[in-house]
Image: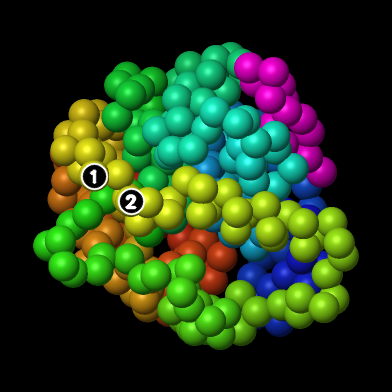
Amino acid sequence: MQRNTARFNREAKDRGMQIIPSIPPRTQTVRDQAIEIFEQGSGEPLLFLHPARGLDGCEAFLGALAKSHRVIAPSHPGFGRSDAPYWMNTVEDLAYFYLDFLDALGIDRFTLSGSSFGGWIAASLATKLQKRISSLVLIDPLGIKVSGREQRDIADVFAMKRTDLMAAMFHDPKVGAFDMKALSDDQLTIIARHRKSEVLFAWSPYMHDPKLKSRLHRIDARTLVIAGASDDITKPEYAKAYAAAIPGAQFREIAEAGHLPMIEQPDACVRAVAEFLAG
C-alpha cells in the first residue's frame, strides 16, 4: 500500500481526488502465520480483501470508508509481506483462513468487501458466514463461470503484455502505469510475490471455482455488486450475472472505470458504497 503512495498522491491531486496519508502496517498472527494488516478508522468493522495487485492505489477509497468504519485491509497469505503457508493453494483455503482471521481479531458482525481476486475470496467467505456479515460489497469480482465451456468469461491476464493488460484493466491505462526501473528491490519482490501467488491460487481452473456459483444462494447479507463500465477483464455483463446469482443483490455500474473502479474512480465508488450501506 505504501509502494507508490507519493506518486499516487501527486496524480490524485492533479485529478482533484481525495488524498490521504500512507498507513503503516501492523502484523497479526493467525494460526502461527504472520499477516500484514493496514487498519484505520473506527466504528463497525469493514474487512476489505484486495485484488491480486495488492492494496496499492486503494488509499483514497479505503480512507473515505474509514470515516465511518474501522477498515481492516490485510495482505492475503502469500501477498505483500504476509506469510505464505505451504498448505494453501486454493481460494477456498483462503476463505477458510479468513474465518480464523476474523476469530483472531475478535470480529463477529462486520461489513465485507472485496475487489477482483479479493471479491472471489469475499464471495466464497460469505457463503460460509450467514448472519455475521451485515453487508457485502463485491467490486468486479472473479470466481465463477457464467457462459459456456468454450467461451471465455475472464481475459487471460497471464498471456497479456503489460501494455495490453493495463488497457484492459483501466479506462485510462495511465492510472495503472509505473516505472519498474524506479522501484526498489523490496518493491519488486512484493510485485513478484503477488504474481506468484495469483498463479498459485487462480491458474487452474482459470480464475474461478466451478462450485462457487452453485453456492452463492447461501449468501444472506445485503449485497451490492459494482462493475466498471470499461472493464475489459470481465465485462460488466459478468458482474451482472454474478449479482443475479446472489439473492436480492443490487448492481451498480461506475462510468469511466475499468476493472478496479475503487482505484480509478474512488469518489464515485465510495458514493455507491455509502448509498448502499445507508440504504
Q: Farthest residue in the left direction?
A: 148
Query: Which numbered marker is on residue 210?
Result: 1
Is disc 1 placed on a helix, strand or loop? loop
Q: Position of residue 61 (x, y in %)?
A: 58, 56
Which residue corresponds to mark 2? 205
The residue at the point 37 percent across, 51 percent down is: 204
Q: Residue flagged by tag 2: what amino acid is it?
A: Pro
Quadrant of the image containing the C terminus? top left
Instruction: Please identify the quarter of the rendering in which residue 258 is found.
Output: bottom left
Q: Position of residue 250 (x, y in %)?
A: 24, 50
Left or right? Give the position of 171 relative to 237.
Answer: right
Q: Position of residue 217 (x, y in %)?
A: 17, 34
Left or right? Give the position of 125 relative to 209.
Answer: right
Residue range corresponding to the magenta coloring? 24-36
For marks 1 and 2, give the one nearer the viewer.
Answer: 2
Given residues 64 and 234, the one toward you in this image is: 234
Q: Residue flagged by tag 1: what amino acid is it?
A: Pro
Q: Answer few, some or many: residues within 10 Å of disc 2's Cα (few below 14, many 20 plus, some between 14 and 19).
A: few
Given residues 10 and 73, the one toward you in this image is: 73
Instruction: Please identify the quarter of the rendering in which residue 155 is found.
Output: bottom left
The residue at the point 26 percent across, 50 percent down is: 144
The residue at the point 45 percent across, 69 percent down is: 157
Residue 122 seen by the camera = yes
Q: Answer few, some or many: residues within 10 Å of disc 1's Cα (few below 14, many 20 plus, some between 14 and 19).
A: few
**Mark 2 or mark 1, which is nearer the start of the sequence?**
2
Tell me if residue 61 comes above or below residue 90 in the rendering: below
Q: What color scheme is it? A: rainbow
Instruction: Please identify the quarter of the rendering in which residue 37 is found.
Output: top right
Given residues 100 and 262, the one toward you in this image is: 100
Provide the major secondary structure of the magenta segment.
strand
Q: Position of residue 104 (x, y in %)?
A: 61, 16
